[in-house]
């Protein structure tokens, strides 16, 4: 490599996950990403009345999580609107109620998966349509391979999840994977950052859409097991999930800076 090329390469910028000097700084970062996640969910059309929740574990009180207030539209959520919920489902910061289903599901997922910082769930159209088939997603596209051998199916529907027992069943079925299809209900994704969980949700929804379209049009050819496994490691890693979210963050924070309020 020439000196010029070396120098040019050294100056190239590539975003990397941040590090923090205090829990206050880390908490604010998680809340900002969370507010941006809701704005993106709204922009993607993942709102269905009052359904849906994204949670971020508090970096200090690690059995507490930040979540959207019940009944507030995703498109209007600001950092200051987020509420903090403890391990018993009580709101300990913020003046609005938590959705009982958000607590029943997310508390159990956060408890079962200490590695999980964030979990995302919404009643998005393609995700819930796909969920009614009671099938895992196939590796039909490069993007779909992020979920190859890395998502679960809760092959049952018993009503709105209001009981932590049902939340525990979801967490047990999810196991160590990044996503779960809740039959007749929708999708849920998790990540080691808010960025990652939100990205997996967005791309999983589109993966459901792609498979529904492909199967409606004909008989899609699947990617072979070996290539799918390899691609999973390339597009399905924690860092790949985090990185894929960054342009969405840039877009939404430029368009809707009031989310920081
Ligand atoms: Zn739901």
Image (cartoon, rainbow, N blue to C red):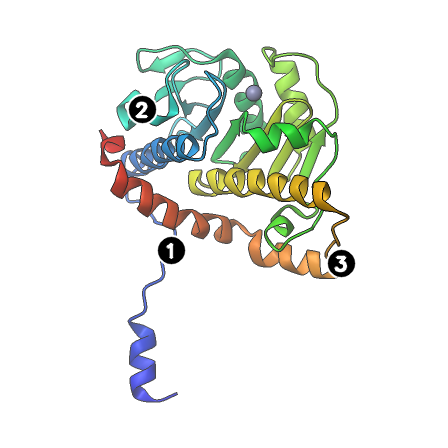
Check contact, mark 3 vs mark 1: CB within 8 A.
Answer: no
If you read the primary sequence from the N terminus, does the residue marked by circle 1 or circle 2 appear first?
A: 1
Q: Is residue 256 left or right of residue 41?
A: left
Check contact, mark 1 vs mark 2: CB within 8 A.
Answer: no
Q: How many marks?
A: 3
* Residue at the spot 52% in from the left edge and 26% down from the top edge: 122
Q: Is residue 130 left or right of residue 190?
A: right
Q: Which residue is mark 1?
A: 16
* Residue at the spot 39% in from the left edge and 35% down from the top edge: 40
Q: Secondary structure at mark 1?
A: loop
Residue 76 tag number: 2
Q: Is residue 171 left or right of residue 30?
A: right
> Label 2 crowding class (10 Å Cα cut-off): few <14, some 14-19, many 20+?
some
> Label 3 crowding class (10 Å Cα cut-off): few <14, some 14-19, many 20+?
few
* Residue at the spot 65% in from the left edge and 42% down from the top edge: 213
Q: Secondary structure at mark 2?
A: helix
Q: Work out how far the residue at label 3 is from the one at label 1, CA to CA, in angstroms.
A: 32 Å
Where does the image place residue 215, in percent across and percent down from the top left? 72, 43
Where does the image place residue 14, in percent across and percent down from the top left? 36, 61
Q: Work out how far the residue at label 3 is from the one at label 2, CA to CA, in angstroms.
A: 43 Å
The foreground one among 119 and 58 is: 119
Q: Secondary structure at mark 3?
A: loop
Q: Quadrant of residue 137?
A: top right
Camera sees residue 113: no
Q: Which residue is mark 3?
A: 224
Where does the image place residue 132, in percent across and percent down from the top left? 70, 26
* Residue at the spot 26% in from the left edge and 23% down from the top edge: 80
């Amino acid at each position: 490599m020439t000196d010029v090329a070396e120098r040019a390469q050294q100056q190239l910028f590539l975003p990397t996950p941040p590090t923090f000097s205090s829990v206050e700084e880390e908490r604010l970062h998680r809340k900002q990403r969370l507010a941006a996640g809701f704005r993106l969910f709204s922009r993607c059309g993942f709102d269905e009345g009052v359904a849906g929740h994204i949670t971020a574990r508090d970096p200090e009180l690690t059995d507490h999580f930040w979540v959207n207030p019940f009944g507030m539209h995703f498109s209007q959520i600001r950092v200051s609107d987020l509420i903090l919920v403890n391990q018993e489902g009580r709101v300990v910061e913020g003046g609005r109620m938590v959705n009982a289903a958000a607590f029943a599901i997310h508390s159990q997922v956060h408890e079962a998966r200490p590695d999980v910082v964030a979990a995302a769930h919404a009643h998005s159209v393609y995700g819930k349509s796909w969920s009614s088939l009671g099938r895992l997603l196939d590796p039909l596209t490069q993007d779909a391979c992020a979920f190859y051998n890395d998502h679960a199916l809760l092959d049952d529907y018993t009503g709105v999840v209001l009981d932590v027992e049902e939340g525990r069943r979801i967490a047990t079925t999810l196991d160590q994977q990044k996503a779960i299809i809740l039959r007749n209900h929708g999708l849920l994704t998790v990540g080691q950052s808010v960025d990652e969980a939100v990205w997996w949700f967005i791309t999983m929804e589109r993966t459901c859409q792609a498979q529904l379209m492909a199967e409606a049009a004909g008989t899609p050819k699947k990617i072979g097991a070996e290539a799918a496994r390899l691609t999973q490691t390339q597009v399905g890693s924690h860092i790949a999930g985090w990185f894929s979210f960054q342009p969405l963050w840039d877009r939404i924070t430029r368009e809707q800076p009031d989310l920081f309020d």
